[in-house]
Image (cartoon, rainbow, N blue to C red):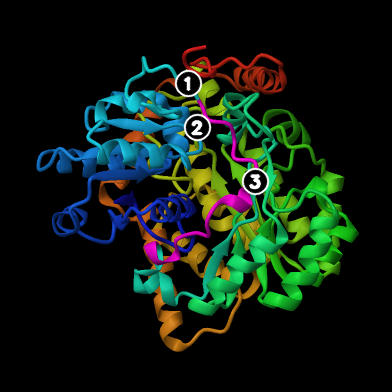
Amino acid sequence: MFVVNDLGVNEPFGPMILSAILKQKGHETILGVIQQEDVIQKMSSWKPDMLAYSMMSVDMGDMKKFNDALRQKTNIFTLLGGSHATLERSCINDPGIDAICVGEGDEAIVEVVDHLDKGNGKDIETIPNIMVSEDTPLNLNNFIEDLDTLPFMDRELVYAYPQMARFGIKGVWATRGCVFKCPYCFNNRYNRLYKGKGKIVRRRSVDSMIRETKELVQNYRVEFIRIQDDAFILKVDDWLKEFAERWSSDIGIPFYCLLRPESVTDELAFYLKKAGCFSICMSIEAADDRIRNRMLRRQANKEQLENAFRIFKQHKINVYANTMLALPFTSLDHDIASIDFAIKVKPDMPNFSIFMPYPGTDLGDYCQRVGIYDSKKEDIHFGMRNMSPLTCFTKKEREAQYNICQLAIVAVKLPFLRNLIVNHLLYWRPNKIFFIIHYLFAIRAYGKKIFYFKHTLGEYIDLFIRTIKHYLYDFFRVSEGNKLTQRSKTLNEGYTKQSTRWKIQELEKCLEAMTGSQIATTREVVPIGK
């Protein structure tokens, strides 16, 4: 049984691919969703031999709560996989977790299940990519080079849930891997972990992608496609030209994908539009070139960003653009400059999120090393739409950052309100009115400009319920709300004595650390056993 925390707009591709592989080998699979059903009751009727958790860092709090309750009733074998288990391998110390899967699990999960079937559970630690303790020597399989050898995703695993099957947006994928070194993301260290284990970015053939999408369209409702690659296209090549021809002729369904601004050219946008691209995600991250280029290691400068936005507007491709707030040691002036830059380039869906120091990332570990974040005292399981957990900000700053997160979309869509928001509303206490305003602007931009397709009245109601649940999960959970209050009081102590000059000096050190050849971190990120 695969277990995920929740189901939203994005399908959990990892379990869907692994389920297809297991079924190909003759095994049976089913999905459990912690937030949507009684998984323990489902287990009692289905009687699985193993639970395979697929979790990100933000899911770990909910997963541990569920798993601890589960362990009081059964001693089923538990395997934890995903980016959190790969980079924060100390999670194997949880007595409720029997093993973790580090990196790609396509081959490892089959071996684990086969061992359990044969009663050889004690030998699992010999399987590549599997650890049963921190002392387990880690031997990684090479990257799978030929992605066409993988079976198509097991759609039934997820679409057995009616709300997922009837929803008009479905996901597909073309590539694995990301070559970029963003310090807030796990891919950078993931690539270092796999050094010498094969090519980082691998791509399916156009034919494989088209055949899977055709099968998807034949069996399920599909009004819009989301291509879920980290960076779908990096340059114009024969693959893109073939994709543009075949997608438009064989599929003919509008799609959304993720791109890097430094890769954008007029020719690239032409082929995307020819294929049927309706919208893309292209992040700004920060208006300040030094912060974007040095701290965040993003390669595009302002001129390249402006040019990329201009190109997509000329080709009538809508843009979702994310901007990060509350980056370590930055000021509100930096965040307000990011609002102004977004106003200038006019993304169709401007999104603003709070930086979170995820464990196992370069910037997250730097925050722990310099003492502005303590993972033992402040968890980050509440996500990127809540207040910053960093102690380099005062309570007033954190509240203003949170208000930017809610109101910046209004300033971008209605620039005449910019001064009112920046000079006044940002400094109000966070409140549910700002949350509701953000929600109304965001759902309209998403529905009209990013994931557009015609809905029935029932679908509008369903989408409203699903979207509001997503926002409520971030904002209205009582326990997390209490954490916000406690966090504001606790973090405000200690920083009020620090000077602006100190903060500027620490920002320079952070910029230097993120651009230096030796990144200072709280752990050595090399394959265990070497």
What x and y, as percent, mark residue 401?
53, 44
Q: Is residue 144 magenta?
A: yes
What amino acid is at disc 1?
Answer: Gln
Query: Which disc number belongs to residue 114?
Result: none
Q: Secondary structure at mark 3?
A: loop
Image position, residue 16 (x, y; %): 44, 56
Q: Amino acid at mark 2?
A: Pro
Residue 317: % across, % down: 76, 68
User: Local crowd at mark 3 within 10 Å, few (<14), some, or many (≥20)?
Assistant: few
Mark 1–mark 2 distance (CA, rounded to whole Å): 8 Å
| In this view, 352 is above or below 142 | below
Q: Which residue is mark 1?
A: 368
> Residue 58: percent from the left, percent from the top?
40, 42
Q: Amino acid at mark 3?
A: Asp
Mark yes or no: residue 376 visible. no
Who's the residue at 79% across and 67% down the image? 244
Please state the extent of the stretch shown in magenta in the rendering.
140-157
Classify residue 110 by image quadrant.
Answer: top left
User: Do the residues under discs 1 and 2 have CB atoms within 8 angstroms?
Assistant: yes
Q: Earlier in the sequence, mark 3 or mark 1?
A: 3
Give 431 or 319, whichever is nearer the viewer: 319
In this view, the residue in front, 152 or 447, is: 152
Residue highlighted by disc 3: 146
Please report whichever mark, 3 or 2, sits nearer to the chain's N-terminal start: 3
Residue beneath disc 2: 357
Q: Determine crowd level at label 2: few under 14, some 14-19, many 20+ residues with C-alpha closer than 10 A.
A: many
Residues tagged 3 and 2 counted as in contact (Cβ below 8 A): no
Residue appearing at x 30%, y 35% in the figure: 115
Q: CA distance from mark 3 to mark 2?
A: 34 Å
> Counting other residues with Cα less than 10 Å from the Cα at mark 1, is it few (<14), some (14-19), or many (20 or more)?
some
